[in-house]
Amino acid sequence: MQVHLVRYRDGGRIMRDDLVVPGEGEENYVLARDARVVTVPFSPLEERMQKEKPEVFARLQKLKEIIGEETFKRLVSKVHNINYADTRIMLVAESELHRTNIEREILPAIAEAFEVTSIRVVTQG
């Protein structure tokens, strides 16, 4: 039978000597007095890209012509983000299922619309 010695620490809490108290030796973080978390409703990719990345928006319009409105709305509008440079593109999908559907259905169309040779589709999280 193994026995652990118990001692009092931190205002009377019972702790074992071999346990580490959470927060011990960690830095203290200062939070701004007016800090808050806000929720922003999800907007379709093309709306965000038109404001944030006009060069991507033009390519998205070409992609929409290639794959059609229905497929574009189902697969591309739900994409969280697109990073595009030279011959490479990375799309951030909303889920593994969404990623799989993009890879299965529209990779050649993405390559054509964005004139890329390297396509990476990842999920957030």
Image (tube, rainbow, N blue to C red):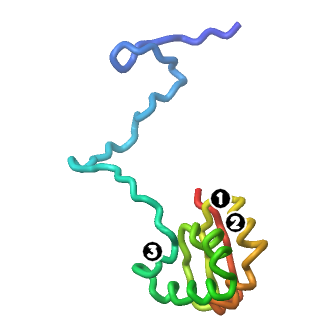
Residue assigned mark 3: 48
Question: Please, what secondary structure does the residue beneath circle 2 have?
Answer: helix
Q: Residue at x 32, y 46 (%)?
A: 29
Q: Is residue 23 above or below residue 74?
A: above
Marks 1 and 2 close (CB-CB < 8 Å) = yes
Marking on residue 99? 2
Dot 2 crowding, Cα within 10 Å, few <14, some 14–19, many 20+: some
Marks 3/1: CA–CA distance: 19 Å
- The quarter of the rendered structure image containing the C terminus is bottom right
Tell me the kind of residue under disc 1: Ser
Tell me the kind of residue under disc 3: Arg
Q: Is residue 29 above or below residue 7?
A: below
What is the x, y in percent for residue 33? 21, 47
Q: Nearer the viewer, mark 2 or mark 3?
A: 3
Q: Nearer the viewer, mark 3 or mark 1?
A: 3
Q: Is residue 42 above or below residue 68?
A: above
Q: Residue at x 45, y 86 (%)?
A: 54
Q: Is residue 39 above or below residue 5?
A: below
Q: Residue at x 45, y 82 (%)?
A: 53
Residue assigned mark 1: 95
Q: Residue at x 52, y 85 (%)?
A: 56
Farthest-out residue, top: 1
What is the x, y in percent for residue 89? 62, 81
Q: Earlier in the sequence, mark 3 or mark 1?
A: 3
- The quarter of the rendered structure image containing the N terminus is top right
Question: Please, what secondary structure does the residue beneath circle 3 have?
Answer: helix
Q: Quadrant of residue 117?
A: bottom right
What is the x, y in percent for residue 51? 40, 80
User: Horizontally, is 68 left or right of 28 in the view?
Assistant: right
Q: Quadrant of residue 11?
A: top left
Q: Earlier in the sequence, mark 2 or mark 3?
A: 3
Marks 1/2: CA–CA distance: 6 Å
